[in-house]
Image (cartoon, rainbow, N blue to C red):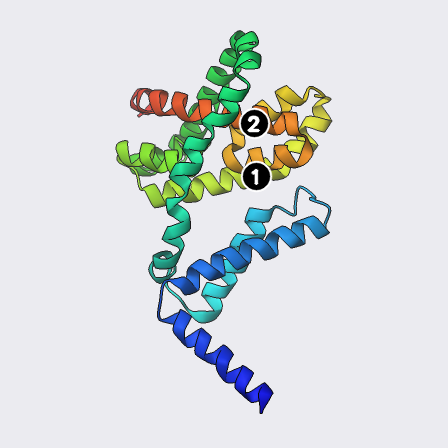
């Protein structure tokens, strides 16, 4: 009887959650917790990226229950809302390390400008070579910026914010997986440079990976992420107009 009562209780909880946005918020959070445990169990291997695993788990749940994305987002939007405050909070490592940043302002500024332009121009030229329409290119331009900022930039350029978010995720996932092996292959040992490159090219996912490798690298990745958001917001309209 006790097992039966527990089963009914679990079923009642499922029925309650399925009728509210809380279900998909719960699924999102549980998927991330599970993904983090899996990543930790695999020694934080570059391929065991927490966000990628969480996306796969959540997508599997949506596919298994035939749930439309719109229904899912009714719950997940609460997490999505936090992207804004999280992006603003990226100013903290910049402020805390302002003296270090100021001492290296010229090389960091040069790397920031070249990196931001390379990320945009290379993607846009490849896209244009394949005949991709302008609205898609507008969503592609801010692919190396954190999602909250990229969606705003894409919308301002006439692109689809949702598509921009997907392209940001793909860019970050590729960067987070490849950054450590690539830096090792290049023989780059300076954690400041490694972190700055990761944050500049692969935004939040690259920054999270940098923190797993080294605290200094993570700090400089966060600085690059914050600065790149500002620079890309200024340069994206100019670059897109020049190339279209």
Left or right: 177, with 160 as reference point:
right
> Which residue occupies the foreground of this view, 140 or 211?
211
Left or right of residue 70, residue 203 in this image: right
Kindly identify which numbered label has been placed on residue 174.
1
In percent of width and height, residue 50 lies at 59, 48
Name the disc covering residue 221, or none.
Answer: 2
Between label 1 and label 2, give the one nearer the viewer: 2
Query: Residue 131: x percent and y percent?
Result: 36, 36
Q: Are marks 1 and 2 in contact (CB under 8 Å)?
A: no
Q: Which quarter of the figure is the C terminus placed in?
A: top left
Disc assigned to residue 58: none
Is residue 172 something that shows in the picture? yes
| Picture residue at 39% right of the left edge, 60% below the top | 72
Question: In the rendering, at what x and y percent does residue 27 appear?
Answer: 48, 61
- Please tell me which residue is depicted at 34% across the width and 21% down the height of the picture: 234
9 left or right, relative to 150: right
Q: Is residue 239 visible?
A: no
The residue shown at (59%, 86%) is: 3
CA distance separating discs 1 and 2: 16 Å
């Amino acid at each position: 009887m006790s097992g039966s009562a527990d089963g009914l209780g679990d079923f009642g909880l499922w029925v309650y959650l399925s009728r509210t946005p809380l279900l998909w918020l719960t699924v999102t959070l549980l998927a991330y917790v599970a993904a983090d445990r899996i990543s930790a169990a695999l020694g934080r291997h570059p391929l065991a990226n927490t966000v990628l695993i969480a996306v796969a788990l959540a997508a599997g749940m949506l596919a298994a229950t035939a749930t439309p994305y719109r229904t899912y987002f009714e719950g997940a939007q609460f997490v999505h809302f936090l992207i804004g405050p999280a992006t603003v909070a990226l100013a903290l490592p910049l402020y805390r390390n302002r003296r270090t940043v100021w001492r290296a302002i010229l090389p960091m500024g040069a790397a920031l400008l070249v990196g931001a332009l390379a990320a945009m121009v290379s993607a846009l030229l490849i896209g244009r070579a394949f005949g991709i329409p302008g609205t898609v290119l507008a969503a592609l331009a801010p692919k190396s910026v954190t999602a909250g900022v990229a969606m705003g930039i894409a919308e301002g350029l006439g692109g689809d914010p949702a598509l921009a978010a997907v392209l940001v995720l793909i860019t970050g996932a590729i960067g987070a997986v490849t950054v450590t092996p690539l830096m090792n292959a290049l023989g780059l040992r300076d954690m400041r440079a490694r972190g700055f490159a990761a944050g500049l090219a692969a935004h939040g996912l690259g920054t999270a990976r940098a923190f797993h490798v080294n605290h200094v690298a993570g700090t400089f990745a966060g600085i690059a992420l914050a600065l790149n958001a500002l620079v890309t917001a200024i340069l994206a309209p100019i670059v897109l107009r020049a190339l279209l």
